[in-house]
Image (cartoon, rainbow, N blue to C red):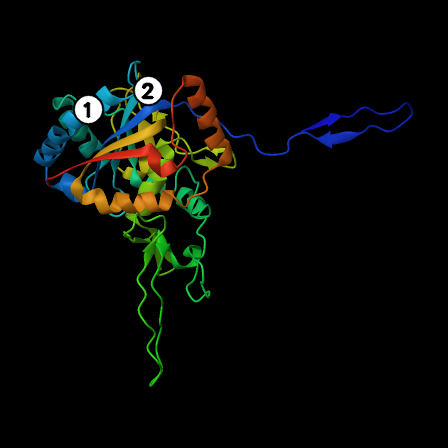
């Protein structure tokens, strides 16, 4: 876009660029995005009873999240559910989703938004996971000699300084003394985590569950952008319309409840089986080292301030969890 500058009499027209940077598209925000489940195909394969047990365990915690949200005011809370169609494919949307919604409804729960995990890798032709990977801001630990490749090459990301990599020692070489890994900002003792974010085999990259879950959190927090445009936007699914036979024919993110609060929110809460605890720990490690879109972060900060809501500066601290024991 150009506009004309002021010119002296007889002088030629003067033009200057007025768009210095891409405009960041805003997204509507709820107070809390409440995740009612993130199950794998083996959970669905176990039958409706597994889903029934899951939602029975989720219901009291979902009620607690609603009761605690934004005390003293009417909270905007949306619910979501993530289905793994990335690592395995089982059944079809037409067969599985009606059973899922029925079991949730029988437990007194409503799923507002349904997402496919493959949409956290590629959505509407946009390589979402790859774009997030390019935003990693890993800093080499002090004293690093460059022998270990950076996270963008290795696919591994740590929350601190790894122990020394001795490599292959030559015969009679002096064995270096062992040094333990250390966690950044540890509280006296370290809990060191080294996360595999992807692997490359047969000329194909496969994103790890923790990395896709980190993308999922960024989407729920309204922080994903592609050239300023919001990605993983929900598409309305008409009430009563039959779901497709193929997973690829289902949009990456569908809105099932027309009256739902916005999909993205200032904070997220997830009620998950306890087996997800190590995965979500890894998610926090990744979120701590992602340089999220500055325009999106600024929009969240300005809007939360207008609503009088305190939102943590650190992205990872905007996510909360309940882990229940069981299958």
Q: Which residue is the extreme one toward the top?
A: 73
> Mark 1 falls on what kind of element?
helix
Q: Which residue is the extreme one toward the front?
A: 188
Figure quadrant of the C terminus? top left
Q: Nearer the viewer, residue 137 or 234?
A: 137
Figure quadrant of the N terminus? top right
Q: Which mark is residue 304?
A: none
| Disc 2 target residue | 261
Relative placement, left or right, of 2 versus 314 is right
> Mark 2 falls on what kind of element?
loop
Spatial CA span between label 1 and label 2 = 18 Å
Could you tell me how many numbered marks the image carries? Answer: 2
Relative placement, left or right, of 237 versus 148 is left
Q: Which mark is residue 64?
A: 1
Q: Is residue 205 visible?
A: no
Residue at x-position 33% and y-position 56%: 182
Q: Is residue 301 visible?
A: yes
Q: Position of residue 134 (x, y in %)?
A: 46, 48
Q: Position of residue 158 (x, y in %)?
A: 35, 53
Q: Earlier in the sequence, mark 1 or mark 2?
A: 1
Label 1 crowd bin: few (<14), some (14–19), many (20+), radius 10 Å = few
């Amino acid at each position: 876009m150009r506009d004309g500058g002021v010119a002296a009499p007889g002088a030629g027209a003067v033009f200057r660029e007025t768009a210095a940077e891409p405009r960041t598209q805003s997204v509507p925000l709820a107070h809390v995005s409440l995740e009612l489940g993130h199950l794998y195909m083996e959970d669905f394969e176990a039958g409706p009873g597994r889903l029934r047990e899951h939602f029975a365990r989720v219901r009291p915690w979902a009620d607690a999240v609603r009761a605690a949200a934004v005390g003293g005011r009417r909270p905007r809370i949306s619910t979501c559910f993530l289905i793994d169609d990335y690592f395995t494919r089982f059944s079809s949307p037409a067969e599985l989703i009606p059973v899922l919604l029925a079991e949730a409804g029988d437990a007194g729960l409503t799923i507002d938004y349904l997402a496919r995990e493959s949409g956290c890798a590629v959505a509407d032709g946009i390589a979402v996971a790859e774009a997030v990977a390019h935003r990693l801001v890993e800093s080499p630990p002090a004293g690093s000699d460059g022998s270990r490749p950076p996270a963008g090459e290795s696919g591994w990301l740590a929350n601190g300084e790894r122990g020394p990599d001795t490599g292959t020692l030559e015969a009679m070489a002096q064995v270096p003394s062992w040094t333990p890994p250390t966690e950044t900002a540890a509280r006296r003792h370290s809990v060191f985590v080294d996360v595999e974010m992807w692997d490359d085999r047969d000329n194909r990259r496969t994103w790890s569950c923790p990395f896709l879950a980190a993308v999922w959190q960024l989407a729920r927090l309204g922080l994903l952008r592609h050239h300023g445009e919001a990605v993983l936007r929900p598409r309305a699914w008409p009430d009563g319309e039959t779901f497709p036979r193929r997973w690829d024919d289902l949009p990456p993110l569908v809105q099932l409840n027309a009256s739902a609060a916005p999909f993205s929110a200032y904070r997220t809460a997830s009620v998950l089986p306890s087996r997800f605890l190590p995965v979500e720990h890894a998610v926090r490690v990744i979120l701590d080292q992602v340089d999220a879109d500055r325009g999106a972060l600024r929009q969240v900060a300005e809007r939360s301030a207008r609503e009088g809501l305190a939102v943590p500066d650190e992205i990872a601290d905007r996510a909360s969890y309940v882990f229940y024991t069981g299958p």
